[in-house]
Amino acid sequence: GINAEYGILGNDSLKRRVKKEGTGPNLEKGQQVTVKYSLLLSSGKMVDEDLELTFELGDGEAIDALDLTANLARVGETFEVVAQSRFGYSTLGRPPHIPGGSAILLVVEVLQAEDTPDVGDMTEGERLRIGDRKRKIGNEHFARFDYERASRNYRGACRFLDPPSYKLGEGAGPGSPELKDIQLKTWCNLAFSELKQEKCDPGIVAANRALEIEPTSTKALYRKGKLLELKGELEEAEKALKSAVKFDPDSQGCKLYLSELTKKITSQKKKQQRMYKKMLNLEESKEGCVGAPDAAGDGKHSRGQSWIEGAIPMVAGAVAVGAFAVAAYNGIRGISSW
């Protein structure tokens, strides 16, 4: 009823009060909802006043204080929400206007709600409008270091900008240059936000899709290299950066990073060689053990050393197989515990 206050989660952390009743059915998840809202801090300071916002209900575009309460509303309804920070802008805040940990008050009027058409039935313009909106919201969350929410919005954007399997009907073309540009930006941004969360595999998938759209994208190649390095695949990372430098020879950032990767790979190989030699007791000694020049003084290594050096690749293979077996065992344990 009017002015009746309801706790959404059974406590005081998120409360909703109806100020004016609306008409028709309640809003539903997945609808495109347009509201006019004002946002105040608990101190009474006005942050946003009478702003219009369109968002997909239940898809993470709006803050939880709005997303979790709007589905109880109807078109034409006005309601207030009092929310603790975890339903607003969390400990990160929204600099410079909303400090981290701030409770907020929302005053919301529901202006419109429409069902979202199937992606396959939408025009390119409709997909571009919704997808680019989600991308920009992702950028806002990225700027405030909320990388999880940024990734969620970038993935939501890709559902419209770059639908899975391209199920857009018979004869659908590759899209306009504008659509291709926004697709590329969104996948690159998703790769970056996954990198920030150290989520290597989904980040690499995003970078690869960006490179399918534009194979010469140095930004996608650079981020793919970073993700591969984080995953421990240094040589694959080096390949990505070599391609980036090939496409953009003037990129100082790419050239510097490529140089760092090459040095790291060289250092890693030297460490591996020392380890293999130590395992095979190949360290040369001052007394002239296996591996020292032969008595004839011709500078050639002994037959014993030659045989053992030939065994180094076999030892390396055995070490790799053993490491793979341990990783597989640990992976099985991890899956069973999950």
Image (tube, grey):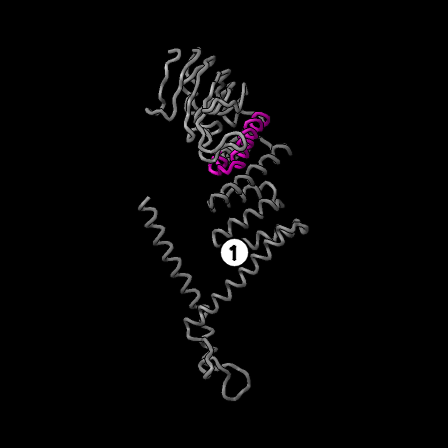
- Residue 247: horizontal and vertical position, in percent? 65, 49
Query: In the picture provided, is 317 more to the left or to the right than 247?
Result: left
Is residue 132 part of the magenta span, yes or no?
Answer: yes
Answer with the quarter of the image where residue 15 lies: top left
Q: Is mark 1 on a helix, strand or loop?
A: helix
Main SS of residues in magenta: helix
Position of the C terminus by quadrant = top left
Return the residue found at the far bottom.
Answer: 296
Return the residue found at the far right.
Answer: 250
Q: Which residue is drawn at 40% across and 65% down?
A: 318
Q: What's drawn in magenta, residue-wise?
A: 124-152
- Residue 145: horizontal and vertical position, in percent? 50, 38
Residue 92 higher or lower than 324, as above or below: above
Give the residue pinned by disc 1: 234
Residue 7 higher or lower than 301, as above or below: above
**Residue 57 appears in the picture as rendered:** no
- Residue 181: horizontal and vertical position, in percent? 62, 36
